[in-house]
Image (spheres, grey):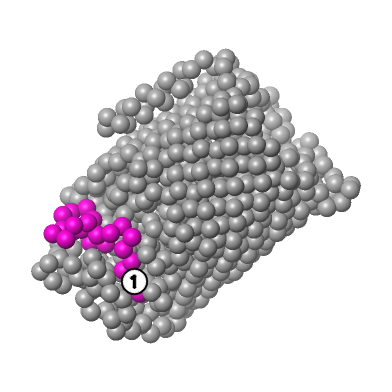
Amino acid sequence: MILSRKILSLLVAGISAPLAAQQALPAGTPGGKAVQLAPIDVRGQRPDEGYARTDASGATKTDTPILETPQAISVISATQMLDQGVLTVQDALRYSAGVRADAYGVDSRGDDAFVRGTSFTQYLDGLRQYFGYSYARTEPYFLDHVEIVRGPSSVLYGQGTTGGLIALSSKLPQFVASHEVEAQVGNSARKQVAFDVTGPVDSAGHWAYRLIGVYRDSDSQIDHVPDDRKAIVPAITWAPDEDTRWTLLANLQFDRNGTSLNFLPHAGTLLPNPNGRIDTRRFVSEPGFDRYDTDQRSLTSLFEHRFDDTWTFVQNMRYSHDNVDYRTLYPDVYANPAYPFLDDSQRTVARYSYIAIDRHKRFVTDTHAEADFDFASMRHRLLMGLDVGYSHTDSRRGNGYDDVPFDLYSPAYGNGFVAPDVFPVASSRTRQTGVYVQDQVDWGDRWIATVGLRHDRATLTTGGDRSVDNATTSRFGLMYRFDNGLVPYLSYTESFQPLDSLDFYNRPYEPLRGKQYEAGLKYQPAGSSTLLTATYYDLREENRLAPDPENPLNQIQAGRAKTKGVELEASTRLASHLDLIGTYTWTKARPDDGTLVAGLPKQQGSLWGVYHASGAENDGFSFGIGARYIGVNYDETGELKVPEKTLFDAMVAYVQGPWRFSVNAANLTDQAYNASCLSRGDCFYGPRRSIVGTARYRF
């Protein structure tokens, strides 16, 4: 609690620094065009605005100034990800308001976090990226920026949780040539090389290409668990004129990992054990059997054409084919959470085995038309669209029980373990079709309104069973723009998320439904790179997912939940030397059954700053340090208390001509801590210290 106050005081001090010392940045203008098709040079150089971005498209599907969007948005720029040494998408979320990153600790199976007390839905280039719970993690080196859209967004996307969505934007071909190569080394035997080359193909400037690749050979925090990746993303853009752009982008990614989420018992992690703390590197599965291997192949089409000053047409499509081979063992801490051990010395446990082999085929498309026009003394930006999503999953499953005692403190592997048999389960097919309309209205040079309506039809077919759900969702937002850059707003939004996956027992879930009221204040002085936001929200969610107290590989629907919260976020650049980000989050979430949301702290705060000794645009040294305060959290019953913690991150970088050398450290003091614990019997360790050195050369 004391540390959260310290972070807030530092944040206030940074906000109150003289605005005259900040580097000028053109502010967003009301009624600006939603589509800008002129070629943009993004050669990896530090943008003039530092971490700040004035526009975001995730909340409206149009390039709308953040200041004029009636919803809380955080934008994580490429510069911020570079400075913070982001290794996963989950890492990129750590310094954003309303987000609890690393909620379940070290999990190689995916990027997981709480956004306003619930899980999020992830989109890439405006299209839903994943269906179900097994998938390949996105490589952050392939991304231009990340947007966190907090609160429901179903009017535009259909499939989105109440808490919000994460909108990723790929690096796309550019018409100015740029090339770079990068090498990384780090602890856990990390070795990675990457390259990113882009530029024009023809002298007329109608074609541009981009080719990005990553090769990684690495271990992880958990013994016997690799973190290997081979990935390449070729892309080409055709721009026959300034009004038309068509990009084809392929992604080929092959990961060879293991399972790092170990479901360890309370005693020996959070609670005392006579043998001490269980090693944070402990591997509880079997070498040679354990794996989480993913093969991802996708092709994305991004097309847009501006007919005139009024009409613009956009159509985005993606087809993907993913294979996931997941095999693991985990301790039996669930039959008797109070005492899961097989011996009096509290060392040994039995283990469950589990195999899931999935083959996913997905096709998603979003087509919309935008009209920019004046009517009845008001400026309108009208969006009308249709999106369709289809997925098909074939699966095989196997599970078993190994009663040979497994020593959590001195493990011995290969003691007669026999893998379970694998059997096919009923295939599942989903289809969702949504039609939507949205109008962004400016009038009187002061008022901004956003209204939207959508209707969805979702179908889930499992074997011979078929279920159909229909829903209509809406959004309303109202803002008032003051001359001094202050913009207060009110909004109401709804969510509808059909769950296209099955539970552990191959039973379909009911759709998630939610609604939210939000009031906020945004502030960006004209000609300034400072952006301040303050938000209060009140949301309701039905059919929310929660861990199954009897099966760690299953989720159940826990009924309704009420969540209220306050979020403060600030980003600025001072005198071209100091980039700052500060956040504070207060969250109160309570399901209707009186339980708690496990792993969700009531208070969080963060502060990150980078000092550029010679100025942000010049060669020389940069030094960065950050603090992340994570307050006390509990299990669902409120009986298990996970202590608060403050984690520190740091970086140092040196730029000289085409070279950039950097060292990043996350969890600098190497704290061993519990991220969260569940009443069903398990706890999860947070990430230990990560140190990575990077050398990058541009040519």
Point 62% across, 55% down: residue: 194
Residue 587 visible in image: no
Image location (x, y in percent) of residue 465: 45, 75
Q: Which residues are magenta?
A: 264-286
478 w.r.t. 554: above or below: above
Toward the right, the furthest residue is 204
Point 18% across, 57% down: residue: 276
* Quarter where residue 654 is shown: top right
Point 32% across, 31% down: residue: 4
Image location (x, y in percent) of residue 523: 52, 23
In the image shown, does 451 or 134 lie closer to the viewer?
134
User: In which quadrant will I find the N terminus?
Assistant: top left
Position of residue 326 in the picture relative to residue 641 (left or right): right
Residue 24 visible in image: yes
Position of residue 181 in the picture relative to residue 58 (left or right): right
What residue would you read off at disc 1? Answer: 285
Point 56% across, 57% down: residue: 192
Position of residue 391 in the picture relative to residue 511 (left or right): right
Image location (x, y in percent) of residue 149: 50, 42
